[in-house]
Image: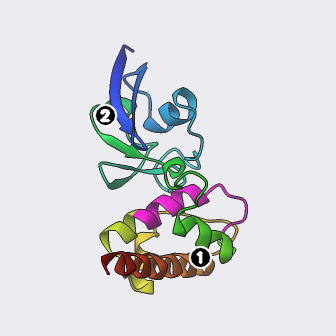
């Protein structure tokens, strides 16, 4: 298989890498760029552990080729925090004990962030629907849903404070 050179943006930083044309984005992120937050849970797009966004759209990075992100914007869980300051979703996952083993957590965080960017005030049903592509085998989902709802509330409050 031939290799391709890809120039893209990952978490706001311009990056360039060379990969086989058939290499999944998940493998590029983990093995070529050292971004190990996205996990391989299934390799078939069924578990959501490898979730990232590409140009703002939630995708399973195991189903996207690294070559496909040429010129596009990729966001991973590593890009959520602002330096040492955790993103509200990350803080709320901790506060609500919405994680245990951690395999699914990065995917849930990215999926929840994508939801809140498109719908800043979701209902519980909308949160559950948006997170349905992410599987957790440890915590169940109630704490995760409560953490997302609480983070959304905090983010809305912060946004309305900035407008004043």
Query: Residue 138 appears at what percent x and percent y?
Result: 70, 67
User: Residue at left 60%, top 81%?
Assistant: 142
**For residue 7: magenta?**
no
User: Residue at left 33%, top 27%?
Assistant: 7
Q: Residues within 10 Å of mark 1 (few under 14, many from 20)?
A: some
Query: Residue 39 appears at what percent x and percent y?
Result: 58, 47
**For residue 101: magenta?**
yes
Which residue in the rendered view is the most extreme toward the top? 2
Report the residue marked by disc 2.
68
User: Residue at left 60%, top 58%?
Assistant: 104
Which mark is on residue 112?
A: none
Q: Is residue 120 above or below residue 10?
A: below
User: Residue at left 60%, top 60%?
Assistant: 105
Of residues 148 and 100, the one nearer the viewer is 148
Q: Is residue 9 left or right of residue 99?
A: left
Q: Secondary structure at mark 2?
A: helix
Where on the picture, by quarter, is residue 101?
bottom right
Q: Earlier in the sequence, mark 2 or mark 1?
A: 2
Question: Secondary structure of the magenta portion, mostly?
Answer: helix
Q: Residues within 10 Å of mark 2 (few under 14, many from 20)?
A: some
Query: Residue 29 appears at what percent x and percent y?
Result: 50, 35
Q: Is residue 154 above or below residue 3?
A: below
Where on the picture, by quarter, is residue 81?
bottom right
Give the residues drawn in magenta, as a range. Answer: 99-113
Q: Is residue 36 above or below residue 110?
A: above
Report the residue marked by disc 1.
141
Q: Secondary structure at mark 1?
A: loop
């Amino acid at each position: 298989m031939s290799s391709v050179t890809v120039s893209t943006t990952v978490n706001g930083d311009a990056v360039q890498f060379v990969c086989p044309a058939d290499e999944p984005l998940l493998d590029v992120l983990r093995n070529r760029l050292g971004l190990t937050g996205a996990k391989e849970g299934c390799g078939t797009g069924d578990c959501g552990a490898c979730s990232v966004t590409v140009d703002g759209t939630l995708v399973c990075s195991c189903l996207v080729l690294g070559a496909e992100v040429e010129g596009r914007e990729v966001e991973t869980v590593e890009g959520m925090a602002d330096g040492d300051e955790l993103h509200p979703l990350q803080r709320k996952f901790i506060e609500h004990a919405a994680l245990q083993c951690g395999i699914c957590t990065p995917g849930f965080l990215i999926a929840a962030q994508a939801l809140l960017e498109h719908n800043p005030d979701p209902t519980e049903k909308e949160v559950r629907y948006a997170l349905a592509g992410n599987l957790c085998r440890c915590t169940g989902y109630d704490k995760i849903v409560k953490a997302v709802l609480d983070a959304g509330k905090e983010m809305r409050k912060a946004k309305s404070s900035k407008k004043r």
